[in-house]
Image (cartoon, rainbow, N blue to C red):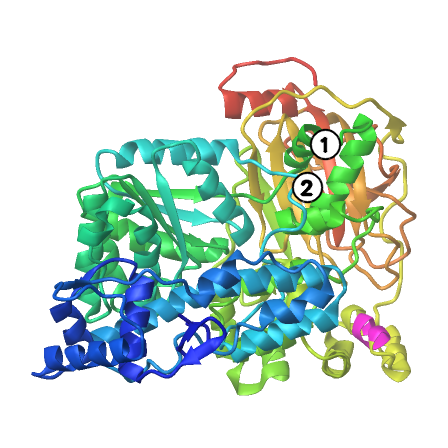
């Protein structure tokens, strides 16, 4: 049986001429792989009163052509016949270019062509289900081959694969079918334990999980959770078309049906979605095995099709061990899903979040891989990688695959990473993605007025799409966090937005042609040269517009001392890494992209930001002191060069005690520029890539740390103010250990 392309039958090298109904009958029996009653077959293929007579006529014609696999006078018909799909799946994927054309040859067009308009509506629904299942299997193999050829730089061969996929109506993405080299694995122990508890509860009643994390990590985590257990996992991409979703689910469930029970098991045939769902529920209950069913990339509740919520309610009422997982990439979308799902199932909802990788996560993975080097070198490299990648596992792997990880990130996102990220935007229309790509040319914050300059009247709608998808977030010019819980709340009155991830912004921006990017930079330079001359200067310089460059320079405020250079603190001195103590990591990410985390009694601040003036981050510590403070820290990433037009002054660390001035530290000389409204002193230059100690005396009262940087990776390993210390604060908060007065 030939099912790849137009359906036909062959014996040896010769094709046999058959009627379309005969080909449909043989195809149905071959793909079903189990006996069916003559009345059932007749009703499928002929929706008329004389269906049985028509079936007998076709069987007689087949016998006349030498095709007689059916016993006479038997009510049940079955057919054991090889298909070209079976043969193609058995062929190893080509490893040489010369084998590629032969491997692609059987793929001649959409599967089961010629059967679309035959028989009853039930048969046509079956054809749609089978075609989808065949295409899924073919697409998976084509995607793997296409990605491998792309990675090997064999673009011409890769295009042959893409062209054959187009012929079949399949859409290959440039995103790799699997993550880059998987020798390095990442684990989320706390989240895995949380899921194990959910599986245990599901033994009593079905449970619902809202899982947030990048697509690469979500699928791998769920597969790990069912390994070596009685559970089976079915992972599907959410679809707005219920028949296709149910068809895919049916095909997955069919794999779990024991061979000796398949003749008695009836899968739905696409007649009616509600009936099909009920029949699938019966199959799931009859299987009697614990099931985890994941629907990935679920849309925002306002975009749900009408049938989705009733389907979820039905599945969650089935009497079997069941965990239903709805997943998304974007944190903001997860926040929008949570109220709707909580209303649906109440306490049976569990939220599981896979956070970005931290420095400790990466160092542990490198050690497990056997890649551990000298402690200082390993930390520096891990920190640079995590800062540049924003902790995205696929980006981390890409950076570790490079021979030398640069100290400063390249704003260009590697293609394989960009493909993964853009594939996660499948729920955003192509038109809106193009508009967001234009908006991604903006560095930093923007309002609806600036967005309208680039997008016209559609700007408000596009901003709404970006907010709903979690790509955009409200952001102010300054952000305050309170330790140890890292509480942060944005103002409801904030009317400026920013891309929530600079990596995603860069990936989107790169999708535009170079000529369009250049034109947009020129537009932004002209618009901002008067109102924001520093940022206008950045655009004018990048767009190579000398007249606007001069205009922007003249519009800059007159330079004066950036801050008081009187010695207000002792200079930095070399130090050893402070001892830490493990505790659960606590992290938040601010809208402006600062990742602030407490891990092993260390405070980490990271940011990968766009060009331009960076926002101020202030970290307020509890308790009061006499004004005396000491700390041990290191800076592994900082802005590569002083920005002559950047103001207020960027700095890697600021310390303020009580009502005293803010003492700021940089990794290079501070240029003469306007200062911000806060009185601040220049404390000195700190080294890059090594531990150092600082101390100073300020006013009595609470202590605050601050950072203002585009790119930054700051780690504070020890901090003491008055009778308080960072070490004690973390132990009290995260381990409940009442320690007081011990030094860091």
Q: Does the magenta stretch include residue 385?
A: no
Q: Which residue is drawn at 85% across and 32% down?
A: 690
The residue pinned by badge 2 equals: 605
Q: Is residue 497 above or below residue 356?
A: below
Q: Residue at x 40, y 62 (%)?
A: 82
Where is residue 593 shown, x and y percent of the image? 63, 53
Q: Give the range drawn in magenta.
A: 537-542
Where residue 536 sits, quadrant-wise, is bottom right
User: In the rendered image, is residue 444 in sight?
Assistant: no
Where is residue 560 shown, x and y percent of the image? 89, 59
Q: Which of marks 1 and 2 is nearer the N terminus?
A: 2
Q: Residue 585 or 140: which is nearer the viewer?
A: 140
User: In the rendered image, is residue 681 in sight?
Assistant: yes
Estimate the spatial distance between the alpha carbons at disc 1 and disc 2, rounded to whole Å: 9 Å
Q: In this view, does 573 lie above or below 549?
A: above
- Crowding at dot 2, Cα within 10 Å, few <14 / some 14-19 / many 20+, comes out as many
The residue pinned by badge 1 equals: 716
Where residue 615 sits, quadrant-wise, is bottom right
Q: In which quarter of the image is the C terminus?
A: top right
Q: SS for tag 1? A: strand
Q: Quadrant of the N terminus?
A: bottom left
């Amino acid at each position: 049986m030939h099912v790849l392309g137009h359906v036909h039958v062959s014996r040896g090298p010769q094709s046999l001429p058959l009627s379309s109904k005969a080909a449909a009958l043989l195809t149905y029996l071959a793909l079903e792989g189990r006996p069916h009653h003559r009345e059932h077959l007749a009703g499928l293929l002929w929706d008329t009163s004389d269906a049985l007579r028509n079936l007998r006529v076709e069987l007689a014609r087949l016998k006349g052509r030498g095709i007689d696999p059916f016993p006479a006078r038997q009510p049940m018909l079955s057919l054991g016949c090889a298909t070209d799909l079976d043969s193609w799946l058995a062929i190893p994927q080509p490893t040489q270019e010369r084998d590629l054309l032969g491997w692609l040859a059987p793929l001649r067009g959409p599967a089961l062509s010629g059967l679309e308009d035959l028989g009853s509506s039930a048969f046509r629904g079956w054809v749609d289900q089978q075609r989808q299942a065949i295409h899924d299997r073919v697409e998976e193999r084509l995607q793997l081959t296409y990605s491998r050829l792309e990675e090997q730089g064999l673009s011409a061969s890769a295009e042959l694969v893409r062209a054959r996929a187009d012929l079949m109506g399949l859409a290959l993405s440039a995103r790799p079918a699997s993550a880059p080299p998987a020798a390095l694995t990442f684990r989320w122990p706390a989240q895995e334990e949380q899921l194990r508890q959910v599986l245990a509860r599901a033994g009593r009643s079905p449970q619902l999980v809202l899982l947030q994390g990048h697509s690469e990590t979500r699928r791998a985590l769920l597969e790990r959770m069912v390994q070596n257990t009685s559970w089976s996992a079915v992972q599907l991409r959410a679809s707005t078309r219920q028949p296709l979703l149910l068809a895919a689910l049916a095909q997955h469930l069919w794999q779990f049906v024991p061979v000796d029970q398949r003749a008695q098991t009836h899968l739905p045939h696409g007649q009616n979605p509600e009936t099909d769902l009920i029949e699938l529920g019966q199959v799931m209950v009859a299987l009697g095995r614990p099931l985890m069913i994941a629907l990935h990339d679920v849309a925002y509740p306002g975009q749900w099709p009408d049938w989705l919520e009733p389907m979820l309610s039905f599945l969650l009422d089935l009497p079997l061990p069941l965990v239903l997982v709805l997943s998304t990439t974007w944190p903001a979308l997860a926040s929008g899903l949570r109220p709707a799902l909580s209303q649906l199932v109440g306490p049976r909802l569990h939220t599981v979040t896979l956070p970005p990788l931290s420095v400790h996560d990466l160092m542990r993975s490198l050690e497990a891989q056997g890649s551990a080097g000298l402690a200082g070198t390993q930390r520096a490299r891990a920190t640079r990688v995590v800062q540049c990648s924003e902790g995205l596992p696929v980006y981390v792997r890409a950076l570790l695959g490079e021979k030398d990880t640069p100290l400063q990130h390249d704003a260009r996102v590697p293609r394989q990473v960009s493909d993964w990220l853009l594939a996660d935007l499948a729920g955003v229309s192509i038109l809106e993605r193009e508009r967001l790509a234009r908006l991604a040319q903006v560095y930093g914050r923007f309002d609806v007025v600036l967005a309208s300059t680039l997008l016209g009247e559609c700007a408000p709608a596009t901003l709404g799409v970006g907010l709903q998808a979690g790509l955009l977030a409200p952001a102010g010019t300054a952000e305050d966090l309170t330790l140890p819980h890292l509480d942060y709340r944005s103002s409801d009155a904030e009317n400026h937005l920013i891309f929530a991830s600079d990596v995603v912004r860069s990936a989107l921006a790169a999708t535009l042609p170079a000529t369009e990017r250049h034109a947009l930079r020129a537009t932004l330079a002209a618009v901002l040269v008067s109102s924001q001359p520093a940022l206008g200067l950045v655009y004018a310089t990048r767009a190579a517009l000398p007249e606007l460059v001069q205009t922007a320079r003249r519009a800059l405020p007159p330079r004066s001392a950036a801050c008081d250079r009187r010695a207000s603190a002792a200079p930095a001195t070399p130090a050893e890494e402070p001892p830490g103590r493990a505790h659960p990591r606590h992290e938040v990410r601010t809208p402006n992209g600062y990742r602030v985390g407490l891990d092993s009694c260390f405070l980490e601040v990271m940011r990968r930001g766009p060009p331009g003036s960076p926002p101020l981050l202030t970290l307020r510590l509890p308790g009061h002191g006499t004004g005396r403070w000491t700390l041990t820290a290191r800076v592994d990433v900082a802005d590569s060069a002083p920005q002559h037009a950047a103001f207020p002054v960027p700095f890697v660390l600021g310390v303020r005690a009580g009502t005293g001035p803010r003492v700021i530290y940089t990794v290079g000389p501070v240029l003469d520029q306007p200062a911000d409204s806060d009185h601040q002193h220049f404390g000195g230059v700190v080294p890059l890539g090594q531990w150092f100690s600082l101390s100073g005396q300020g006013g009595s009262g609470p202590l605050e740390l601050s950072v203002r940087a585009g790119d930054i990776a700051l780690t504070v390993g020890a901090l003491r103010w008055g009778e308080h210390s960072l070490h004690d604060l973390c132990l009290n908060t995260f381990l409940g250990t009442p320690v007081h007065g011990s030094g860091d």
